[in-house]
Image (spheres, rainbow, N blue to C red):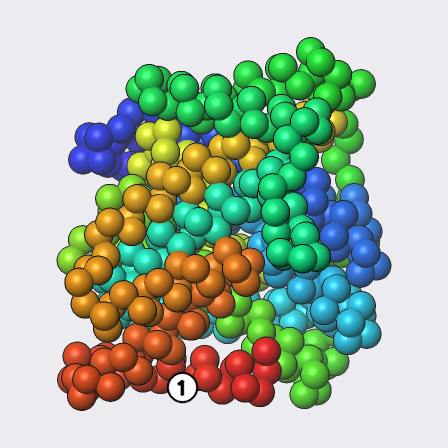
Amino acid sequence: MNKFFQFQERGTSYKKETLAGITTFLSMAYILVVNPVILSQSGMDQGAVFTATALASIVGTLLIGILANYPIGIAPSMGLNSFFTFSVCIGMGIDWEVALTGVFIAGIIFMILSLLKIREKIINVIPQDLKYAIAAGIGFFIAFVGMKNAGIIVGNDATFVSIGDLTSPMTALAVLGFVLTVILMVRGIHGGIFYGMVITTIIGMIFGLIEIPSSIVGSVPSLKPTFGAVFTHLGDIFTVKVLTVIFTFLFVAFFDTAGALIAVASQAGLIKNNEIPNVGKALLADSTSGVVGAVLGTSTTASFVESSAGIAVGGRTGFTSIIISACFFIALFFSPVLSVITPEVTGPALMIVGALMAMEIRKIDWSKLKVVIPSFVTIIMMPLTYSVATGIALGFILYPLTLMAQKRFKEIHPIMYVLCILFCLYYIFVA
């Protein structure tokens, strides 16, 4: 096991990997609660979606850990589950069965692109500075998500966003959790993020802010209401409306996953010579989980940027993913306990992880305007548009344009030209 996962080469151990796996699971466990709630509004059975979410996460995370040796968790994407429910099913009036079939078709296309190494090629031709910008931008993005979830940042009609009510009990708990975790981190305590979440949860239960579960073990809901629904609606996808939906699933999921892989690989120090090792296998694992998830009954899966929480406490290999999968399996039977993992508990962890990821910004060559503008736009647009894919797309549009303006055409890879044109067409005709 030690040799298979390359513990020595990556400077890690069973203890570090186990702690990292548990930390990442705690950071992304909210998906087991939130995903069923969101998808149930499209008409899907909430219990079946819970089971499908856990199983799809287990399959995808196991695959990326074993095939690619990556410390990453895979689960249904938060952005795409909202798009599935509110834009596709409610907004466009498409039945959830047909929308799920669209997810299935998009997953099959992803698998083909992964097997042909097209996705791998695209990721590897992304300029190094843009890779750093993507990693840093995701850091700002997830820190913003953490602040929003904790109530530290709230919406404001006049200024779009503003500081929340820090005297609110739950927000105050999150602030306390953030301060405690910072103290643990700066004192060099390994696993500070994990311990910070545990301490915050205990304090929340002591003061009655987090409800103590009335039971520990719960039954596993049946998959019957959603399992295999995609196979009965394959003939319903050949309309312009549904094909547009499939394309959008492809676009957003592709670059959400690409961004997560780049960010995590950069943070873990895995990128060598501007290439990510085993990225093809990682992408195949991701796309396979999307197909499996659609068959089981959940929306598109993606590599979770919250995996950075585990890397921050030492996760470097696929053994971290094995632990994450084991935690998802256990969660199937202990669903009542998930209620203690509130946004106010995970918010501080995301804020700190965001700060750690934002350190990649120092590696960008800020002396060159052709690099500065695309990198800055990539970084700033992720939190402002609440979309990793949008930040990447706009950076991909600007980067070739800045080089073309300097008549440095040979420095641009042909794939970057193609992506620039596709993104422009997407925002003109689709988005």
Q: Quadrant of the C terminus?
A: bottom right
The image quarter in which residue 310 lies: top left
* Quarter of the image where the N terminus is located: top left
Which residue is painted at 48% across and 51% down in the image?
141
Vertical position of residue 413 compared to residue 218: above or below: below
- Name the residue located 23 percent from the left edge and 70 percent from the top edge: 369
Q: Is residue 327 left or right of residue 17?
A: right
- Where residue 348 appears, as percent x and y from the top left, is 52, 32
Q: Position of residue 142 (x, y in %)?
A: 49, 46
Between 110 and 168, the one nearer to me in the picture:
168
314 or 360, which is in the foreground?
360
Q: Nearer the viewer, residue 158 or 369?
A: 158
**Residue 60 appearing in the image:** yes
Q: Secondary structure at mark 1?
A: helix
Q: Is residue 376 above or below residue 179?
A: below
Q: Residue furthest top?
A: 206
Task: Give percent across and percent down for residue 265.
Answer: 31, 49
Task: Return the residue at label 1.
Answer: 421
Inspect this view and state whether residue 61 appears: no
- Label 1 crowding class (10 Å Cα cut-off): few <14, some 14-19, many 20+? few
Residue 316 sits above or below residue 88 on the image = above
The residue that appears at 19% across and 60% down in the rendered structure is 365
At x 42%, y 42%, the residue is: 354
Residue 287 coordinates in the image, percent (x, y): 49, 61
Residue type at mark 1?
Answer: Ile
The reply, left or right, for residue 278 in relation to residue 19 is: left
Q: Which sits in the foreground, 145 or 320?
A: 145
> Residue 430: which quarter of the image?
bottom right
Q: Is residue 141 left or right of residue 414?
A: right
Numbered marks: total: 1
